[in-house]
Structures are given as C-alpha cells and as structure tokens.
Amino acid sequence: MQKKIREQTVLFFSVAKWIGLATIVGIIVGFATSGFLKLLNLSISYTSGFSYYYLILPLAFAASTLLIKKLSPEAEGHGTEKVIEAVHTRSGRIDPSVVPVKLAATVITLAAGGSAGKEGPCAQIGGGLASLFADIFPFSDFDRKKLVICGISGGFAAVFGTPIAGAIFGVEVLFVGSLLYDVLLPSFIAGITAYQISVLMGAEYFHYLVPFKPVFSEVFFLKVLLAGVFFGFCSFILIEMLNAGHRISNAMRIRPVYKALLGGAAVALLGLVFSNQYLGLGLREIESTIGGHAPSWYAFLLKPVVTSLTLNFGGSGGIVTPIFFIGSAAGSTYAQWIGGDVATFAAIGFAAVLAGAANTPIAASILAVEVFGPSIAPYATVACVVSYLMTGHRSVYPSQILSVKKSTFLDVELGAELGKTEADATLPTWSLKKIFSFRRKAEDPDSL
C-alpha cells in the first residue's frame, strides 16, 4: 500500500510541475505571439496601401538575408523545421538571438509581399523563448525538450486560434507515425494558455462554419476518398517544389544577397503577371474560397512556386499559411471538376493538404473541427488520413523522424530523418498480386 501511495504522490507532483511550467511557457508565448501578430498586421496594412508595394521584394529579400546571415543564421528557413531539428539534435537548445531576428525578417518578408506563413516564426519564437526559459533555470535536457515542444504548441495555437489542434501539432509534428504522450498534458496546457492570452490581447482569428448538411451516401463518400488522394498529390507537388527551389538555390554559386535580389525580382514579376493575390499571407483569398468563391483553377499550382521562391531565395516565414491557401484552392478546383460544393471541398482541402504536407493527420483533423465546425469533421478526417498516406515518406519538415512505414511494401529506414532517407518502392511485376494476397506465410515480414 505504501508503494502505491508513493507512486501516486510522485505522479501528482509531476503533473503539478508540468501544469505550472506549461502555463508559464503558454503565457510567455501568448504575449510574444500577440506582439508579433500586431506588428505584422500593422506592417501589412501600411504597405498594402500602395498599389505596387511588392516591387520592393528584391530589397526586402536582401534585407532579410543580411539580417539572418549577420545576426542569427539559425533563423533561416520556415521556422518550425529549425525547432524540430533543435529538438532532435540539440535537446531543444535554440540561440536566443533567433527570436528578434526571426520576427524582424518575417515582418519584412510578409509586409513586402513574400509568400510565406506566420506560424513558423511563432513556433520558432515560442521554442526560442522556451529554450531561454530553460537556460535561466537548471532544467535537464529531457525537460528542456518538453518545454520547447510546449513552445511549438503554444505558438501554433496562438497564431491560428486553434488550442487543441495546436497542442496536438506540437507533439505530432516531431515524428511521422507516433505521438509523444508524455508531452501531451503540458502541450495542451501551453496551447490553451497561449490562445487565451492572445484573445485577451485582442487577436482575431478566422473561424467559418461551413453550411454543410452531412447526408451520407456512397457516392459522396467516394468523392471524399478521391479528394484525399488528390490532396495527397497536391502535398507532393508542394514538397517537391520546395525541394527543387532548394536545389536550384544551392546550385547558384553567387553571394546570398544576390540570390535574394534575383528571387525577390522573380516573385515580384509573378505578382505583376498573375496579380498579387498569390503574394503575402493570402488570408483574404483563403476566406473568399472557403466562402464559396472559386479562384483560378491553377491557383493551387502557382502558390507552391511563389512560396518556394520566397523561402529558398532569402525570404523568411512559415509554411502552414501557404498550405492553407493551396489546400483551399485545390479543394475548390476539385469541387468544380466533380460538380461538388466549392466551400465544402475547400474546407476539406484546407485541412487535408496540411495533413499530407506536414504528416500531421490528427492535428489537421482536429483543426478542421475547430475552424469549420463538427458537421464536416468525419469527411475532413477521412481526407486527411488518405492525404497523409498518399504523400509518401516526405515532408515540408525534412527533420521529422520516421517512426512507422506508411506501407510495408516500401523500403525505408525507420528512425532516420525524412530529409536523409528516400522511399524505395520494392514492387516487382508480380507485387500487386502480393499486395492483395490474403494468404501469406507467417514468416513473411510483410505479413503484418
């Protein structure tokens, strides 16, 4: 009996400890995120008052590049990826200089019209502040990692107004195919706290109840399944576009500032040719699509190009907001192809492309509920899982660790970073028969 009492006592104080620490991290991240969002909104409001504001993109990319190269190289990229890398390779240690540098570089990029998101900086700012908090007090490496994960969850929750999805995102995005249950409670506490602080500070969020009346039918369910396949293909396109941009940028043997000038000029040119709706955050276009107004059919193909140029040629920012743009635009195009409701499939695509591109089907499914209401949840969840599977063993976050194969018929290395392993489909001519066979030998490793 005494042993059981001691066990319960230890568990009680452990829970109490992490409720307190996660609350502190949530408060810090909530205030930091609110400040970032206010500064970002003010900057965008000012620059968007000029007709061709995006013509300053070459200078903005150059300024962002110099700022990061000179002051904090760790702030390069789209934020969340660097935090994932820090958790896996440095026990969550993040240079404190990342916080102000990432904030400034992202504001410069987005205010000038660069195609990026706002969640990456918030995740990196949240993770950086959590790491700084761990530096002040003598926390172990294990506790530091948990605090930084809380920072990711708090940043995502506060920037999108989705406390539950934000909490799950923080524990799901680190590994493909597994969740860190030991960080689940503090992530929830940090996410909810950061969200409430942001609301208190006046943050406004996009929530839209899709006027969808769920009437189940085999035909509609089949359309949703096929939509999941299509959204997985869209995730694949985005990831490959980002990788192609990275390879092209690395192949250019010129100074980074010159690459930034070229990249900024290319994005500005695309803004002139295709209108500036593909630049910046694209929130107005996302809301319009979710509201049932279909964009151009090629919008889901052009946005990855503009985003890849931005993030690989000097711009700074996140990747999730462009994913929302791509997902909602792809859903609209798919709805027009099949004669479906634009708003319904735009909302499903909004979540499903995130599930595929980031390998976070659970967080994306919950996000669909928080943003669009429970009516669409079953169909969004199915599309999210299918998209996650169809994207394959790749991600917009190449530092993710692969924990589970998406198919036993693919030869991939478990425990490796996605960016350092390649999926190799070992499928000879007779393999389809093998896949659909229900009679396998017990010793067959693929029998599971």
Image (cartoon, rainbow, N blue to C red):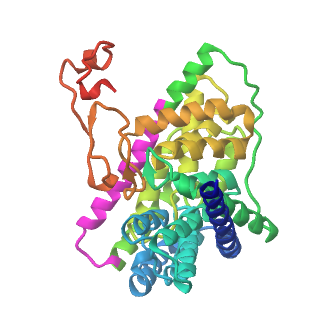
Total residue callouts:
0
- Give the residues drawn in magenta, as a range: 229-256
Res 160 visible:
yes
Q: Is residue 383 left or right of residue 30?
A: left
Residue 53, quarter of the rendered image: bottom right
With respect to residue 329, does 8 lie above or below?
A: below
Magenta residues, dominant SS class = helix
The residue depicted at 65 percent of the width and 55 percent of the height is 283
With respect to residue 349, does 18 lie above or below?
A: below
Between 338 and 5, the one nearer to me in the picture: 5
Quadrant (top left/top right/bottom left/bottom right) for the C terminus:
top left
* Residue furthest to the front: 1
The residue depicted at 56 percent of the width and 22 percent of the height is 223
With respect to residue 247, does 379 lie above or below?
A: above
Q: Is residue 246 magenta?
A: yes
Q: Is residue 207 magenta?
A: no
The residue depicted at 72 percent of the width and 65 percent of the height is 193
Q: Is residue 236 left or right of residue 102?
A: left
